[in-house]
Image (cartoon, rainbow, N blue to C red):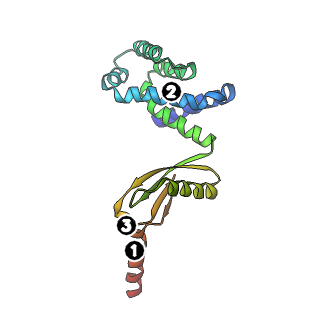
């Protein structure tokens, strides 16, 4: 099993248990997982120790337990982190957090995407685009705004693998291709 598949399985198992037993904390657990995952990814010495196969899992569990004690993480996230430590798979935690986020967003019927424009979009325009996409998809849409002057004007919106390209650059390219095809 690939590490991505394993991370998805851990995330799904945690999510399913929380949904059944403690649905009120499923969003909070995401923050806890991401907080601990950030600690692992931003601390090179910690990542070196916890990712080192020469260090026994029992010592890694002790390190994780000490970190959890200082971070005061609630038990569901802590239990998963200790389970990963016991199985010497703590380095999966960033992927587990990402998979858990995807599971939560799917459960809440939220789609994340990005909108790219040539100039920064006013908040009202961004909210209007989100609302239009929400109507089209039947889900709540949360967009991250990006700026790319090369699109000249208009917007390019990505939701998962779907791209809505209303950029001036693309329209110009289509006109160019139509003129080339007409002359051939």
- Please determine whether, in this image, residue 111 is positioned above or below residue 41: below
Q: What x and y, as percent, mark residue 142?
A: 54, 48
Residue drawn at 47 percent across, 31 percent down: 34
Q: What x and y, as percent, mark residue 80?
A: 53, 23
Q: Which circle's residue, 1 or 2, is located before the other in the chain?
A: 2
Whether residue 2 is visible to the viewer of this picture, yes or no, is no
> Which image quarter is the C terminus in?
bottom left
Corner quadrant of residue 137: bottom right
How many residues crowd mark 3 within 10 Å: few (<14), some (14–19), many (20+)? Answer: some
Q: Provide the residue designation for mark 1.
A: 172
Q: What x and y, as percent, mark residue 165?
A: 47, 64
- Please determine whether, in this image, residue 184 is positioned above or below residue 48: below
Whether residue 156 is visible to the viewer of this picture, yes or no, is yes
Q: Provide the residue designation for mark 2.
A: 32
Q: Which circle's residue, 3 or 1, is located before the other in the chain?
A: 3
- How many numbered discs? 3
For marks 3 and 1, give the CA distance. 10 Å
In the displayed structure image, the side of residue 119 where residue 101 appears, left or right: right
How many residues crowd mark 2 within 10 Å: few (<14), some (14–19), many (20+)? Answer: some
For marks 2 and 3, give the CA distance. 41 Å
Residue drawn at 51 percent across, 58 percent down: 125
Dot in front, 2 or 3 = 3
In the displayed structure image, the side of residue 72 where residue 50 appears, left or right: left
């Amino acid at each position: 099993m690939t590490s991505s598949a394993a991370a998805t399985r851990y995330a799904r198992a945690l999510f399913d248990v929380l949904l059944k037993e403690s649905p009120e904390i499923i969003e909070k657990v995401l923050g806890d997982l991401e907080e601990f995952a950030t600690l692992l990814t931003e601390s090179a010495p910690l990542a070196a120790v916890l990712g080192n196969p020469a260090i026994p899992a029992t010592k890694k569990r002790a390190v994780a337990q000490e970190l959890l004690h200082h971070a005061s993480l609630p038990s569901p996230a802590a239990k998963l982190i200790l389970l990963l430590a016991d199985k010497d798979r703590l380095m999966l935690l960033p992927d587990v957090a990402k998979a858990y986020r995807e599971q939560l967003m799917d459960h809440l019927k939220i789609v994340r995407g990005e909108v790219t424009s040539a100039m920064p979009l006013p908040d009202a325009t961004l909210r209007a685009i989100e609302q239009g996409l929400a109507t089209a998809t039947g889900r709540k849409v949360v967009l991250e705004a990006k700026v790319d002057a090369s699109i000249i004007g208009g917007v390019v919106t990505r939701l998962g693998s779907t791209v809505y390209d209303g950029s001036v650059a693309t329209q110009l390219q289509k006109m160019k291709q139509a003129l080339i095809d007409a002359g051939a």
